[in-house]
Structures are given as structure tokens and as C-alpha cells.
């Protein structure tokens, strides 16, 4: 009899599960309304169970309400558990009898244990195995047996003797079965909710996309988004009635038929090879536009379909073509301007070279005749005339030196670089040996660091050191001792060579004039020179891909720095 009663309640709970599933599909999960209705439904099933009970003694009944209420609290939470317990307890009190107190107590403890397990599942989601549910059923019905002490007189002993074994064997198993049934229902509802959310998200993206997105089966459209209608200038019915190549010109740019080429792309996509290609489409009004098409195979509701997206790239294509045209035009202009500049430079160099050569002969004659006059006729000339003649001779010599410097400067551009590994410290010693006459009779302190090797044209780099050291000796004539330092600094991986002196220096406000041809910051009466030396240094350094600059203060000396492209050679070190 107990077994049949339990089967009756299980049948009711199966019905409850189906109805419960429909209710949860009807309302959004987490809302208050579905929990209230669910609690009322659990309470109603408990009432039906109590209406067909197992009667042990007059007024003492047993049924499946403990399973119903505990499962309601477990899967529905406190709202469902409390409503179901309140409905069931009200009905049990209305039935009355000697077992009313125990009946209400069983309803209360079932609801409390069910709600307690509900929160345990929330904290530990893994508490969903059959063993957990079986333990849950045992706990509910052990407490139920303990509550028989509320029965009057010695009735509790008689009741325990009749039902204890059945309650501890059948009711926990029944609880387990119903829990698994509701767990399966819960999993299905969650899966359906996730599916609906995914579909809603996909539909939102599908509808909001600016690109044309459509679904095809075989060679027919079955769905499209608003972007498709906008792009092709037609309505949904016109799209769904067409074939893919109906919105293409007859031929593609490569000369192939659009229908034939589209068929190949569609077949390849159905074969599982995603397609991404450029395509020429046309709108309903006949306007042709360039597009990028992406085709991929998808499964929708068990059917194999193609998902296609089309992006109008007409403006981008036009912009790219315009950029290519402008780049071509710019390259043509650059080539033309470069050719003009090279021609102008060649003409300027030729003019400079010619003038320099043409000036040498008269200058040599002027200097020679002035020297002869001074040697043979100076005693006969008046002092003033002899002075003028010496000035002519000196200026002719200076002009000759200036011409030589100009010729050397102009040759720097035409001379090819012979780059090799060079030891700058050796060049410095060679230059100082050549300038030994400049140091005679003077106290000169030289400090030369262990300069790192580099890649450079040896003869040109020697000329750089020659010009810088010659200037250092020249502008330190008034110093005793004169101090000249040649060293190197490190700027990352790039060595910075420098030549420093304690000479007259210069005002940094005029530093921009230092490296210009014929630019001098000191009067010729004070220091001789042509103003070409530093310009030569700059041109040599620039031809090596480096840079040159200076720092100075009046009467506190000057420092000239330069770098060479390529930095240190392997195995070199700084001193």
C-alpha cells in the first residue's frame, strides 16, 4: 500500500514537472511571478497527495508531501518552498486528527531542508550527483521519523513499527528519482534560455549590421538582413525570389560569366572551404559596385546552409586608385625635380671648377710678378709703394689658397667613398705629425683617447681630423699651455668623436654660421683662413651618414663633435 501510494505521488510529480517546465518557458527566469505560481503548483500537488493518503491510525496519514515540499524548496528556493509549505500546512490543519501536529511539522522540516540544500547548491554547484540527492532524501525522512514523537500516547511506537522500513527505503529513492527528473528539466530550461539568448544576440547583430548578410540553401536566398535590402535597393520578396548571380553583371572583370563563377564559389563553400573574394555586384537599378564577399558553410536547424556577407568597397577602391594615381604623379614629379636638381648641381660644380681653374693662372701671375718686384725693386720703391706691393702679393697667395680649398670642396661631392675599417687614433697621430711645425716654439698639451675603430673612408676621415686639429692649434695660439683633447663619448651604440681646445671659443648665437662656406667668426687680421675648412668637415661627415655640431664659450674654448653612420665595428672599444 505504501509503495502504491508513493507511485501515485510520483505520477503527480511527473505531471508537475511537465507543467512546471511550461511555466518556466512562459516567464523569464528569476522573475517573481513564476516562483509564486511554481510554489502554488507544488502546494496543490501536496494537497492531492494528502487527499489519497495511506492511513495508519485514525487521523494519522502518510503520503508523498515530504518529497513534494522538499523538492520544491530545493529547486525553487525559499519563495517556492514557503508558499508550497503554507498551502500544504493549511490543508493538513484543516484535515485535523491526532497526527495534525506531526503532519505540519513534517511539512515545515521538509521545506527547511529543501531550502537549505537550495543554498548549498548555489555555493557548491557540484552538489547535484545521485548520491547527494539520495542523502538529501534520507535526511528529510529521518527527520520525519523523529517527528513521530509528537504523536499522542504510544501511537508513535506503533507507527514507527509499521512505516519505518518503507520510509527509509522507498521515500529516499522516490526523492532521488524526482530530483533527477527536475534536474533534467532544469538543465533543459537553462539550455533553452542560452539558446534563445544566443539567437537573440545573433538576430540583433544580423539586423543591425551595415553589411549585407543573407542565408542561402543551394542557390536560393532564404533570409536576409535590412542591410541587404539597402545595399541592393530592393525589398525582401525580390531578394528571396532571386538567385545569387541575379544581382551581378553578366561578366566579371576577368571576363568569366558571373553565373558560372558564382556556382564554383558556392560549390566550394558547400564543400567546407570558406570563400573570401572580390566581386562585382549590381543594384536593382543597374548601378554596378565593387564588393568583398565572404561565404561559409553553417548548420541551421539541422540543415546545411551558406552564410554570406557582402561589403560595398566602392569608395575604398576609388580611394586606393586615387592614392595610386597621386603616388605615381608624385614619383614622376620627384624624378623630374631630382633630375633638375642633379643637372643644376652638375652645372654649378662645373662652373665652380671652371672658375677656380681659370682664376689660378692670373692669380699665379699676380703673385709671381709681385714677388719679383719685391725681390728686385723693393729698395728703390718708396715705403708706401712697397707696402702696397706686399699686400698684393699676400692677397694673391690667400686667393690662391682659397681657390685650392674650393676645388677640394667641390671634389668631395664627386669623389666616391672607399669605406673600410679605420683606426681613428692612427689618423690623429698622422695629422699631428703633419702639423708639427704649428707646435714649434709653443707649449701644447695633447690628450688623445683610445678611439674606437669605425667604418669610413680613410683619407676623408683624416681630412676631418686635419681641419679640426688645425683649427684647434690656430685658435689656441694665445694660450700657454694650449690644451687639445681628442676623445669619444657613447650615445647608445653610436660613438661620438670630439676635438676640444681651450682657445678663444666663439659666441653660440652664431653657431649656425660655422659650417657655411666662407663663413668666419673671427677677423682675418686675427686668424688666417678661408672659411672652407668646417664646411668641408660637414660635407665629409654628412657623406658618411653622420652629423656634426659644436659647443663653445668666448675665451673658454670650443668642442667639435661628429658621428659616423654604422657606429663601432665588431670588437672595438671606447677609451
Image: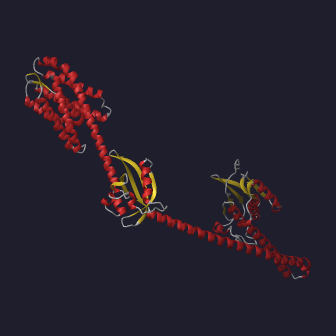
x and y, in percent, of residue 57 in the image: 9, 21
Residue 67 place in picture, x, y as percent: 20, 29
Q: Quadrant of residue 106?
A: top left
Q: How is the protein colored in the picture?
A: secondary structure
Front position in the image: 295 or 262 = 262
Residue 378 place in picture, x, y as percent: 89, 79
Image point 21% across, 21% down: which residue? 168
- Specify whether 117 is left or right of 346: left
In the rendered image, the vertical position of residue 26 relative to residue 392, given as above or below = above
Q: Nearer the viewer, residue 80 or 448?
A: 80
Residue 9 or 346: which is nearer the viewer?
Answer: 9
* Residue 518 in the image, given as x and y percentages of width and height: 71, 72
For the N terminus, the image quarter is top left
Q: Residue at x 17, y 32 (%)?
A: 12
User: What is the quadrant of residue 33 in the picture?
Assistant: top left
Pick the front one: 519 or 421:
421
Number of labels in the image equals: 0
The answer, for residue 70, to whether it is visible in the render is yes
Relative horizontal placement of residue 68, taking residue 183 as reference (left or right)? left
Relative horizontal placement of residue 548, taking residue 397 as reference (left or right): left
- Tell me: 498 left or right of 193: right
Q: Is residue 44 above or below residue 61?
A: below
Q: Is residue 108 above or below residue 331?
A: above
Q: Is any atom of residue 529 visible in this view?
A: no
Amino acid at each position: 500500500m505504501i509503495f502504491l501510494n508513493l507511485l501515485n505521488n510520483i505520477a503527480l510529480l511527473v505531471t508537475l514537472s511537465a507543467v512546471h517546465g511550461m511555466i518556466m518557458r512562459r516567464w523569464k527566469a528569476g522573475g517573481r511571478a513564476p516562483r509564486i505560481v511554481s510554489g502554488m503548483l507544488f502546494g496543490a500537488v501536496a494537497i492531492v497527495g494528502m487527499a489519497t493518503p495511506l492511513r495508519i491510525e485514525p487521523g494519522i496519514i502518510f503520503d508523498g508531501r515530504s518529497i513534494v515540499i522538499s523538492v520544491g524548496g530545493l529547486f525553487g528556493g525559499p519563495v517556492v518552498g514557503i508558499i508550497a509549505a503554507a498551502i500544504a500546512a493549511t490543508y493538513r490543519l484543516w484535515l485535523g486528527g491526532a497526527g495534525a501536529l506531526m503532519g505540519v511539522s513534517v511539512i515545515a522540516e521538509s521545506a527547511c531542508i529543501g531550502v537549505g540544500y537550495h543554498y548549498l547548491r548555489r555555493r557548491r554547484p557540484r552538489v547535484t550527483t545521485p548520491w547527494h540527492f539520495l542523502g538529501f532524501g534520507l535526511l528529510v525522512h529521518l527527520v520525519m521519523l523523529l517527528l513521530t514523537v509528537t504523536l499522542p500516547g504510544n501511537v508513535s511506537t506503533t507507527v514507527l513499527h509499521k512505516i519505518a522500513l518503507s520510509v527509509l527505503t522507498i521515500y529516499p529513492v522516490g526523492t532521488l528519482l524526482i530530483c533527477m527528473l527536475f534536474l533534467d528539466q532544469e538543465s533543459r530550461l537553462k539550455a533553452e534560455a542560452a539558446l534563445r539568448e544566443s539567437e537573440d544576440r545573433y538576430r540583433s547583430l544580423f539586423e543591425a549590421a551595415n553589411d549585407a548578410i543573407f542565408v542561402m540553401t543551394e542557390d536560393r536566398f532564404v533570409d536576409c538582413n535590412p542591410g541587404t535590402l539597402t545595399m541592393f535597393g530592393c525589398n525582401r520578396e525580390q531578394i528571396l525570389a532571386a538567385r545569387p548571380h541575379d544581382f551581378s553583371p553578366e561578366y566579371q572583370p576577368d571576363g568569366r560569366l558571373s553565373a558560372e563563377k558564382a556556382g564554383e564559389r558556392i560549390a566550394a563553400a558547400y564543400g567546407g572551404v570558406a570563400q573570401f573574394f572580390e566581386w562585382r555586384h549590381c543594384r536593382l537599378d543597374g548601378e554596378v559596385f565593387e564588393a568583398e564577399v565572404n561565404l561559409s558553410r553553417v548548420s541551421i536547424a539541422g540543415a546545411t546552409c551558406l552564410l554570406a556577407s557582402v561589403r560595398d568597397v566602392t569608395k575604398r577602391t576609388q580611394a586606393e586608385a586615387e592614392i595610386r594615381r597621386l603616388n605615381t604623379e608624385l614619383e614622376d614629379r620627384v624624378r623630374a625635380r631630382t633630375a633638375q636638381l642633379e643637372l643644376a648641381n652638375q652645372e654649378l660644380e662645373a662652373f665652380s671648377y671652371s672658375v677656380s681653374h681659370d682664376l689660378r693662372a692670373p692669380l699665379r701671375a699676380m703673385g709671381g710678378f709681385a714677388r719679383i718686384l719685391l725681390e728686385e725693386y723693393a729698395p728703390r720703391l718708396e715705403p708706401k709703394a712697397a707696402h702696397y706691393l706686399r699686400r698684393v702679393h699676400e692677397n694673391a697667395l690667400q686667393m690662391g689658397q682659397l681657390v685650392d680649398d674650393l676645388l677640394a670642396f667641390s671634389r668631395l661631392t664627386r669623389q666616391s667613398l672607399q669605406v673600410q675599417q679605420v683606426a681613428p687614433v692612427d689618423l690623429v697621430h698622422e695629422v699631428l705629425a703633419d702639423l708639427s711645425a704649428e707646435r714649434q716654439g709653443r707649449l701644447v698639451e695633447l690628450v688623445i683617447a683610445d678611439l674606437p675603430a669605425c667604418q669610413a673612408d680613410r683619407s676623408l676621415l683624416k681630412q676631418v681630423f686635419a681641419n679640426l686639429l688645425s683649427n684647434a692649434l690656430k685658435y689656441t695660439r694665445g694660450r700657454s699651455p694650449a690644451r687639445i683633447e681628442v676623445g669619444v663619448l657613447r650615445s647608445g651604440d653610436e660613438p661620438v668623436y670630439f676635438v676640444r681646445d681651450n682657445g678663444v671659443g666663439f659666441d653660440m648665437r652664431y653657431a649656425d654660421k660655422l659650417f657655411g662656406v666662407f663663413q668666419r667668426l673671427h677677423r682675418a687680421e686675427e686668424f688666417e683662413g678661408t672659411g672652407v675648412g668646417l664646411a668641408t668637415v660637414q660635407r665629409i661627415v654628412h657623406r658618411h651618414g653622420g652629423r656634426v655640431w659644436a659647443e663653445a664659450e668666448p675665451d673658454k674654448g670650443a668642442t667639435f663633435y661628429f658621428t659616423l653612420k654604422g657606429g663601432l665595428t665588431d670588437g672595438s672599444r671606447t677609451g
